[in-house]
Image (cartoon, rainbow, N blue to C red):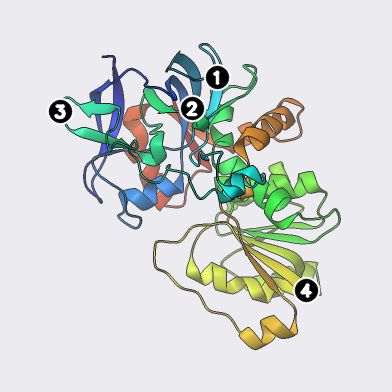
Amino acid sequence: MPTTRAAILRAPGEGLSVEEVELEDPRAGEVLLRMGASGVCHSDLHVVEGEWSSALPLVLGHEGAGVVEAIGEGVTDVAVGDHVVLSWFHPCRRCRSCIAGRAWACTGERSSYGVRADGTTPMRSARGEQLHAYLDIGTFAAHSVVPESACVRVPAEVPFEVACLIGCGVTTGVGAVVNTARVPAGAAVAVIGCGGVGLSVLMGARLAGANPIIAIDVEQEKLDLAMAVGATHTIRGDGDVPADVRAIVPDGVDYAFEAIGLVPTVELMPALLARGGTAVLVGMTPEGERASFDVFTAVEWNWSILGSNYGSAVAAIDFPRIAGLYLDGRLPIDRLITHRIGLDEIDDAFDAMRRRERARSVVLY
C-alpha cells in the first residue's frame, strides 16, 4: 500500500494538517495519479469555513493535474504516463443527459458523495481513519486514487500549474461565456469580481469577441491584471458602479457576470443590464443564501437570469479545447497564477483569499 502526503481538514474553522497517508491500489475503473499541481479555489474555503457541508475528515482540493502512475481493471480512457486534468464533476455516461451530450447535467454522477458505491474510500490516515477526498479527487495530496471518468488527457506540453487551473476556475469562467451565455461578438459585457474565475470570464469574453469588456473589483491589483487578460475598461467596485458602467455603455451591458458569490453583488447585476440583458450567476454563495430583485422591471425589460455551474462544460471536450487555446497563445492562463506554493502553505493561501488578495495560488508538487 503506497504512502503519500496530504492536507487534511478534520473540523470546519480549523487549519489543514499535512500528514503522511496510505493509499490503496486502484480498483476497477480507478486511476492512481501523481499530482503535478493543484489550484487553491474559493470553493475549498467554503468547506473550510463550514459554509458548505462535506463529510470529514477530508482531503480538500479539486483543481488538479498530474501523471497517471497506475490503472485499475477495465480502464481504457487513460494509460500509464498520460498527463491528465481532473474534472471534479465526473459524469456517469449512461443517464439521459449524458447520452444527449449534456454531461454537465448528469443525474448519475457520484462526485458529491466522496465515497465509492460500497461506502469505502481509497485513503487512510496514519491513525487508521477513512479519509474522504473532496469531490472524489482530493488534489491537496501528492498522489490520489480517482475515478477514470474524472481524468481527461491533455498535451504534455501544458505545464501542470496551468493544466490544474483548467480543471476548475478557467473552465468555469470561460465556459460561462461560451457555453452557458453564448456571448456573441460585439456584445457589451461586465464582470463583477476579478479573482481566478472572474479573470477567466474576462478571457472568455475576449475570446468571444465581446466589446466593451468591463472589469469590476475593489482591488487595484486585480483590475490591473484584468486589463492584461482581456478587459477593455475597469471600474472600482467601491464607487457608483451602475453610473460608472453607464458612462461606458449608456444603455447598459448585454451580459453581466457575477464571479464572487456575494448577495450584494448578485443584487447589483440588474442595475447594469440593458433591455433584453442577461445576468449570469457564476460565483457560489454559502448554502441557503437568497437574493432579491424587482420582478416588475425584470419582466418589463425582458431580463434573463442564468445559473452557470462549471461553465456548462463537458470536460472531455472542453478541457482539451482550452489546453489547445492556451498552447496557441489565445488564453493566457499562466497570468492567473500570482503565487506558487508548497503543500504546507495552503492555510496561508486561504488567509490571503479571506483578505481578497491574489488571483490564484497554485500548489506545486
Task: Check disc 2 and give the amino acid type.
Answer: Glu
Q: Residue at x 37, y 44 (%)?
A: 350
The secondary element bearing badge 4 is classed as: strand
Q: Residue at x 71, y 67 (%)?
A: 278
The residue indicated by pointer 3 is 128
The secondary element bearing badge 1 is classed as: loop
* Quarter of image, res 330: top right
* Pointer 4 local density, CA inside 10 Å: few below 14, some 14–19, many at least 20: some
The secondary element bearing badge 2 is classed as: helix
In the picture, which quadrant includes the N terminus? top left
Would residue 28 be found to the left or right of residue 54 on screen? Answer: right
* Quarter of image, res 187: bottom right
> Which comes before the other along the chain, label 4 or label 1?
1
C-alpha span from label 2 to label 4 = 42 Å
272 relative to 114, above or below: below
Q: Residue at x 35, y 40 (%)?
A: 114
C-alpha span from label 3 to label 4 = 57 Å
The residue indicated by pointer 1 is 76
Foreground pick, 156 / 251 = 156
Marks 1 & 2, CB-CB < 8 Å contact: yes
Marks 4 & 1, CB-CB < 8 Å contact: no
The residue indicated by pointer 4 is 276
> Which comes before the other along the chain, label 2 or label 4?
2
Label for residue 148? 2
> Which comes before the other along the chain, label 1 or label 2?
1
Foreground pick, 273 / 250 = 273
